[in-house]
Image (tube, helix red, strand yellow):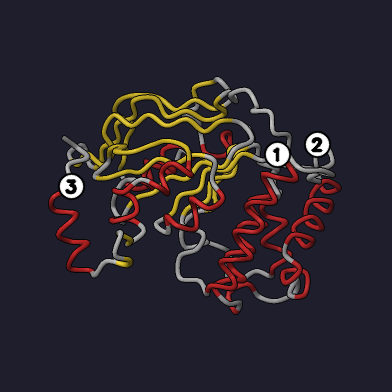
Amino acid sequence: MLVPPHPQDGPASSVAAPPQAALLEFRNVQIVYDNAIEAVRDVSIEVPKGQIVALLGSNGAGKSTLLKAMSGILHTEDGSLDNGSIHFGGEDVSHLAPDTIVRRGLVQVPEGRRIFPALTVEENLVIGGYTTAAAVVRERREQAFTLFPRLAERRHQIAGYMSGGEQQMLAIGRALMAKPALLALDEPSLGLAPLIIDRIYEVIAALRRDFAMTVLLVEQNAQRALQIADAGYILENGRVVLDGPADKLARNQDVQEFYLGLSSAGHKSMREVKHYKRRKRWLS
């Protein structure tokens, strides 16, 4: 069962905390598909322990590819890690099997949720805890029901008949059954209604705040991600073009104009955004 490491009774101290060691590191990673198409080039990313790090970028920037490499499933799409390494807890996990990676506490919620539609909510959760003892599975299942009361209400419902938002809750709950040290979420807000997105983000923030969980948040929704993240990286065409503290990125003019659609005159039109994209020179 997820148990908070200590109570959060008062406001956070005003004294700056010392820098956290990186729990997850991508070191000069290069990923190639079909031995020909370079999807990611020389990417280095650090995810400090106990923080939320946002990985942002447009569709096709390489975000999901990095998560697949992290989870050991690149080979399913004829992808390969041609250079660099991925370290978790100080150990190189670049070539470990997916189930070994999960057992070490590195767990991903994939884009599109990927639940088992023919099984019930409860059965989906039980499958998520396949690496642990039955008694522990029961404890973690109740924790998932506490975080997502709607899942408790529908515990015997066939998952495939649930709404997209409910399926996303189930996907996150299933991942938590493995008791991750680091939870990677791939586009958790994609295609969801605003109220459901609010709930998903409340849970993400609570996982870090109450359970000291480390989170790698992959999103196209830069505004929402930067609101709860400690730090962020922005990918373009398989390369990191900007990185830094989340609040600094949110104030960056390039990010405001292109990713948040804002300028000094307010929201930009799509024509203006496209023009801005043509003239920006982040990769130079």
The quadrant holding residue 270 is bottom left
> Mark 1 near mark 3, Cβ–Cβ under 8 Å?
no
x then y, percent, for residue 193 = 52, 75
Real-space Cα distance between discs 3 and 2? Answer: 45 Å
Front label number (3 vs 2): 3
- At mark 3, the secondary structure is loop
Mark 2 lies on residue: 5
Mark 1 lies on residue: 212
If the image is split into quadrants, where does the C terminus sit? Answer: top left
Q: Is residue 261 above or below residue 28?
A: below
- At mark 1, the secondary structure is loop
Q: Return the disc, 3 or 2, that comes first in the chain's sequence.
A: 2
Q: Residues within 10 Å of mark 1 (few under 14, many from 20)?
A: many
Front-lying residue, 249 or 26: 249
Question: Could you tell me the amino acid type at mark 3?
Answer: Lys
Q: Return the disc, 1 or 3, that comes first in the chain's sequence.
A: 1
Determine the residue positioned at 62% across, 56% down. 172
x then y, percent, for residue 164 = 54, 73
x then y, percent, for residue 84 = 35, 24
Q: Return the disc, 2 or 1, that comes first in the chain's sequence.
A: 2
Instruction: Give me the disc on residue 71.
Output: none
x then y, percent, for residue 56 = 39, 48
